[in-house]
């Protein structure tokens, strides 16, 4: 039996193997790079949405606080107008019922009071080079707040030091934060969105 020696690999075979290995390594590194870039982009997007959600929560709380202050300072001015046949979404299926108690406080109402007291609106815009504004230095975000006063009813509980019966009123604050249409996109193409939050609170109005 004659044993033939194995033919050694030629340089051509070695070059072919090297090319295959290089292509595989390059493909793997490219895939890892694409995955890393996409992952970073998604993290940035999630952080931006989280920040926007936090801003909307803060705006809803600000609107509720401003409404409580304004209603308290105006006595029964607003509560007396809650039976004017207005429509409030907070009344649900009874929103169209003229007998439902309802009154609106819009952002313009808050701006009128805050401007008269301090010269500042409820939300301040960004002024390049001097002020960062209510939503930060990018100046591409707008906020809107609206408060509905509903469910006015007597508490039937006298308040010490006052005569008459106090009233319980529900405040439903709707706040939204969204990018300004046509504004400069600071996220370099990352999808933008509007965030809306609804906050409800009860206030007790003493008799006047």
Image (cartoon, helix red, strand yellow):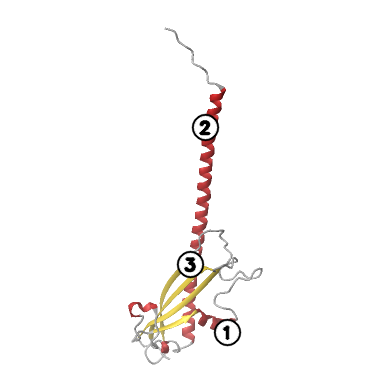
Front one among 37 and 169: 37
Tag shown at residue 194: 3
Query: Residue 118 appears at what percent x and percent y?
Result: 59, 81
Q: Residues within 10 Å of mark 3 (few under 14, many from 20)?
A: some
Tag shown at residue 20: 2
Query: Residue 21 appears at what percent x and percent y?
Result: 52, 32
Which residue is rendered at x = 52% and y = 39% of the image? 27
**Vertical position of residue 13 compared to residue 174: above or below:** above
In the structure shown, which secondary structural element does the residue marked by tag 2 occupy? helix
Q: Residues within 10 Å of mark 2 (few under 14, many from 20)?
A: few
Q: Residues within 10 Å of mark 1 (few under 14, many from 20)?
A: few
Q: List the residue tagged with mark 1.
A: 116
Looking at the image, tell me whether mark 2 or mark 1 is earlier in sequence order: 2
Screen quadrant of the C terminus? bottom left
Screen quadrant of the N terminus? top left
Measured Cα–Cα span from mark 2 to mark 1? 75 Å
């Amino acid at each position: 039996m004659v044993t033939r020696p194995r033919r050694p690999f030629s340089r051509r075979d070695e070059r072919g193997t090297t090319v295959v290995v290089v292509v595989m390594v390059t493909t793997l590194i490219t895939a890892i790079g694409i995955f890393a870039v996409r992952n970073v982009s998604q993290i940035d997007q999630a952080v931006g949405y989280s920040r926007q959600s936090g801003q909307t929560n803060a705006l809803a709380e600000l609107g509720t606080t401003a409404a409580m202050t304004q209603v308290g300072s105006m006595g029964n001015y607003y509560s007396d107008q809650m039976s004017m046949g207005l429509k409030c979404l907070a009344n649900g299926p009874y929103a169209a019922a003229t007998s439902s108690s309802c009154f609106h406080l819009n952002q313009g109402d808050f701006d009128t009071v805050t401007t008269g007291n301090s010269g500042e609106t409820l939300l301040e815009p960004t002024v390049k080079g001097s002020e960062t504004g209510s939503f930060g230095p990018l100046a591409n975000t707008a906020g809107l707040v609206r408060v509905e006063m509903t469910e006015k009813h007597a508490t039937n509980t006298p308040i010490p030091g006052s005569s008459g019966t106090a009233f319980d009123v529900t405040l439903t604050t709707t706040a939204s934060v969204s990018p300004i249409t046509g504004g400069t996109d600071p996220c370099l193409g990352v999808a933008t969105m509007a965030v809306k939050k609804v906050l409800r609170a009860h206030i007790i109005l003493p008799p006047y």
